[in-house]
Amino acid sequence: MKVAVIYNRESQKVINLFGQPNREKYGLAAIKRIVNSLRKGGHQVQAFEGDKDLIDNLEEFMPRTLVGERPGMAFNLSYGIQGQARYTHVPGILEMVGVPYVGSGPLAHSLALDKVVAKMLFVQNSLPTPAFAVLDNSGFDMPELDFPLIVKPKNESVSFGIRIVNNQLELREAADVIFNEYQQPVLVEQFIEGREINIGLLGNGSTLEAFKPAELIFGEGGPQIYTEEDKRRTSGREIGVVCPAKLDAETAERAQVIARKAFNVLGCYDCARVDMRMDKDGNLYVLEVNSLPSLGEHGSYVAAAEVMDLDFARLVNRLVEVASARYFGTPNPPELVKARKSPEEKVFGYLTERRDQLEKRVELWVGISSHSNDVVGIRQAAKQVSSFMRDMGMQLNDAFSDAPHVWTWETDKGFKNGTLVICHIDVPYNSAMGGEHFHRDPEWLYGEGIGASRSPLVQLEFALRALQHARKLKSIPIGVVIYADEGRDTDESADFIAKTAAEAKEVLVLRPGNLNDTIVVGRRGQRRYKAYFHGKPRKLGQSDKNPEVMLQAVSALEDIAQLSNRKERLAVSTVDIRTEAYPRLLPHRVTAIIQASFPNGRAADLLEERVKERLQQSRAELAMLSDRPSMPSRKINNSLLKRIKDQANRWEIPVKTDTSLWPSVAGLVPPQVPVICGLGPIAKELYTGQEAVSRISLVQRTLLLAEYLLSQST
């Protein structure tokens, strides 16, 4: 599970600093100890300041989860930065954004921090508590209480401002300090001479467990209370903790009963510490409930847990388990306690536990430059693929490979009559794009080629690794075609891809999915041509019976553009134009790149004939540069589509269908072989400097691919 440890220590990242500042802080050593204990428990852990950046940090650390995936959880240690009811600030944020967390909610914290309201609730619920009064300002009338009294701020903790007073003068002095320093009312209580007993609590409802009573030993010097200086270890004396306290069994049990009731009266969750005083006659009085008990190694809560056979690491991890039980209704989230016996559960667990690794692997791939015309980069990318393929026991099929353009890998079962997965390693590149480095925001991962190539490669790798983890990879007939010339319109690989696909039972193409969670069931084809227009060199202003070659070309290209027909789903346009000219003369040659989109091969041939007719009028030549066949929507694909959707529905992964104007290698798959395209992660802004892939879809689509392949096991 991902656990975010949230604390307040140094950060003052707020919009404005005002009001009462926080004086409570966890030490760095204590935070590190908690983080290490959680990691020891198998959790992925990061620590964050509870400031205005918290939501962004949590979104990046624990993005949206899959249905059934272990959710992230916050381990709240936050005392707040400033203002009133500071303990409630971070829990309130977590409630708002929907992050489960360890510890009490805002309501319980606010009640526990307001010592007057808490005592009123204790009285209403017949819990013993010392007699008290509230002083609102420095001109107060003397309360009808007998000295000695104990004075403390109404809304503070950690013994801030606490003092024992023995007469009216000391009371006014102590109260004035609180009025001036803390700007809040003063709580005055009858001081209970006797022993201080703490009861730690862990759990909720019927599983609420009370620790054995712990007693604070103050020694002979100084006041017989736990002061702020004692807690900060600056008082010069050592406060001892004895647990279990030397109490008779009846008194110990009575203390535990009172503590449980106080916990429930304030509506606490998961953990708390109830502080009591016991007089010489054995009467117990509740002083306060600490709804955020210190996990410092010298505190009574940790000491009492050790007596309950919970060392520090076990205590910290038990707190996560207790909170999980409260949120999810089991002693742990199902994934923590349920043995993954089925291959499906093993695949699910493997992938959801490695979301960070998926993203790190994407980052690594973004850092590998393998532009379509970069021979060295292609070689490096191919080496990466070969490494993880061999690591998983996949074999290279030389008969269906043609390095350095296309490679076919297969499992022990081979790929014939099995599932063929196709993916490319090159990044189609336009020098005007610029090379975008890897970065992320809460919803998207960015980087050069991240949607077109890099994320599908990681999707493929981790899907296969998950199958290997489930010990199923070798038993499934799977082939993997990796090609390296997508940016060159598969000039070298097309024949091998078509030949390999003809041997498979079905084909999955890991092109990126479209926005709105779609996969692609139909694609238009695309052809690229180069048109050559020739003329005579001439001077500017020189007369000639024939128009300038530039004007001829522009006129012909304009006529060709008119061949686009939405009804026939035909589109044709000029995408590049260049001229050749001698110095100081007008151009004598024009070359233009023409791009055509079409629904099928017959329509493409008819369109080509029409283009040639227009060019003949200008005595221009036409040469085909590339031919990307269409992927028509065919009935033969329906069964494959249904099986993919069934797997998606099982894991509640959204999948819709769409068609695309862009071609893909899916058009090379023979008509008798079912094919689905766009099964890669959802991408946006392809082939631009803002290309990005959805973070949640990366794990969703990887899971979908792995579970679908698993369903084909024999």
Image (cartoon, grey):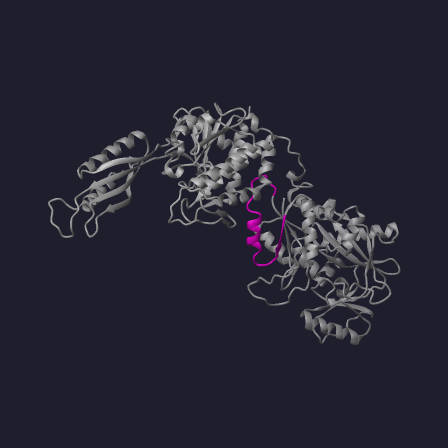
Q: Quick check: 367 above or below 604?
A: below
Residue 701 seen in the figure? no
Q: Position of residue 533 (x, y in %)?
A: 21, 41
| Picture quadrant of residue 603 | top left
In this picture, residue 711 sits left or right of residue 185: left
Eyeballing the image, is 235 above or below 640? below
Q: Is residue 9 left or right of residue 551?
A: right
Figure quadrant of the C terminus: top right
Q: Is residue 497 magenta?
A: no
**Residue 124: image location, x then y, percent:** 74, 58
Which residue is nearer to you in this view: 652 or 14?
Answer: 14
Can the viewer see residue 602?
yes
Looking at this rendering, what residue extends furthest in the front direction?
Answer: 583
Q: Quadrant for the N terminus, please.
A: top right
- The quarter of the displayed image where residue 512 is located: top left
- Residue sitting nearer the eye, 589 or 454: 589
Query: Which residues, given as a range, are shown in magenta?
Result: 45-70
In the rendered view, does 712 fall on the left or right side of 263?
Answer: left
**200 to the left or right of 561:** right
Residue 580 is situated, as x and y percent measured from the top left of the image, at: 23, 46
What is the count of numbered marks?
0
Task: Tell me where residue 144 appears, x and y as whole percent.
Answer: 79, 70
Look at 80% across and 58% down and name the residue there.
Answer: 276
Q: Residue at x 38, y 26 (%)?
A: 671
